Amino acid sequence: MSSHVITHNQSGTSLPTSLMLLLATGAGLAAATLYYSQPMLGLLGEAFQSPPGAMGLVPTLTQLGYALGILLLAPLGDRFDRRRIILGKAVALSAALLVAASAPSLGVLLAASLTIGLAATLAQDIVPAAATLAPEAQRGKMVGTVMTGLLMGILLSRVVSGFVAEHLGWRTMFVAAAVSIALLGVAVWHGLPRFAPTTQLSYGALLGSLATLWLRHSGLRRAALAQGLLSLGFSAFWSTLAVMLHAAPFHLGSSAAGAFGLAGAAGALAAPLAGRLADRQGPERVARLGAALMTGAFVAMALSPGQLWLIAAGAVVFDLGAQAALIAHQTLVYSIEPAARSRLNAVLFVGMFIGMASGALLGSLVLGHWGWQGVCAMAALAGLTALAVRLWPSAS
């Protein structure tokens, strides 16, 4: 199959199950590498005899690398064969994970962490590849299936790394991650077709076209703004949950926060359903529904703070809303300008990353001044604003 060159799905036929599984698994394995280090920070601190503040640079640099990779590398998918890009990043990611596994010092680990973030953006090459391979009538379903794999990778990565690091050591976890990405590269080499470039722009012009696309398409601006606002509330919740649970009156450990994270798997598993709904009812309706679900969940938690069952239920509902909105926004964005899907995806995810980073910062500040109820209220306000963005009449 790799000998074929794809521009778009002209036949309208469904993709083979094996190819859908490859894309979903690849997105999940790549995204998981961003989060393996988080549960291991205590062990890493002991190994390198570093204070918690210094160890916080490990996930920070990983996320920074990912953000830079989305902005600087993801647009290349429109200029070059996506299959070659995915293979190149898989090699780089596997190598960076091996460097992390053998790191003799914190400095080497930090350099490897930045590289891991950059190369893990192969997940953001897989998603537009899936949109290109899928027939138009099933694009939402296909994107939803791949995003399920990506989200499950994120949700399960912390559980897997915590278990492996505790029983076999943190270096073993990095080696296992490197092997998984190497095997992914082999599978992509054999199972993924080649993609014809959709533009001949130079690299500088390619990056400059991001601003052009932003100014040209109001639909792109609305999608990035709305998803960024939803991501702000999402990040504020998850970045403060462990702190809140650790304090009085709960005094619960990090494992409890991890258990709440598993509740979000329900939302991830519902992503294909959101994709099918976007295909049938239109992505605009699904985006509004997602924003409404998030807003309602955070309003309920803000009005009745401190009830663990409500927090767990709210996590399921708002995670479902966030993922449904993301699938809808990706479906909307990919239909704007098919030849620029990688760049459109980059703009959408940069907006999403800005919201995530802002939510983590604001969530900590609000928790310190107004408590958990304030965090939920801020997240509800962000969701309500996102809903207003989606309800506002489009200019184009």
Image (cartoon, rainbow, N blue to C red):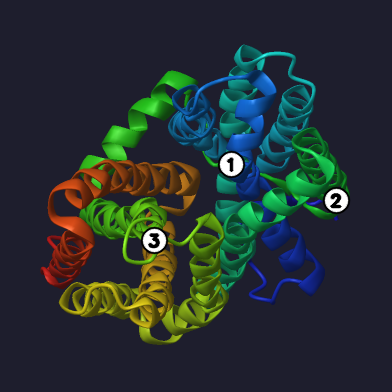
Residue 44, can we see it?
yes
- Which numbered mark, 3 or 2, is in the foreground of this view? 3
Q: Is residue 138 above or below residue 250?
A: below
Q: Is residue 278 above or below residue 341?
A: below
Q: Quadrant of the N terminus?
A: bottom right
The residue at which mark 2 appears reads as 187
Residue pictured at 14% horizontal, 64% vertical: 381
Marks 3,2: beta carbons within 8 A: no
Q: Position of residue 198 (x, y in %)?
A: 54, 42
The quarter of the displayed image where residue 117 is located: top right
The quarter of the displayed image where residue 125 is located: top right
SS label for mark 2: helix
Q: CA distance from mark 3 to mark 2?
A: 41 Å
Q: In the drawing, what numbered circle is on residue 34?
A: 1
Residue 136, can we see it?
no
The reply, left or right, for residue 37 in relation to residue 297 is right
Which residue occupies the foreground of this view, 44 or 98? Answer: 44
Q: CA distance from mark 3 to mark 1?
A: 24 Å
Residue kind at label 2, given as amino acid type: Ala
Q: In the drawing, what numbered circle is on residue 161?
A: none
The reply, left or right, for residue 266 in relation to residue 367 is right
SS label for mark 1: loop
For the residue carrying disc 2, how many other residues have a C-alpha within 10 Å: few (<14), some (14-19), or many (20+)? some
The reply, left or right, for residue 220 in relation to residue 108 is left
- Which numbered mark, 3 or 1, is in the foreground of this view? 3
Q: Position of residue 356 (x, y in %)?
A: 34, 47
Residue kind at label 1, given as amino acid type: Leu
For the residue carrying disc 3, how many other residues have a C-alpha within 10 Å: few (<14), some (14-19), or many (20+)? some
- Which numbered mark, 1 or 2, is in the foreground of this view? 1
The residue at which mark 3 appears reads as 245
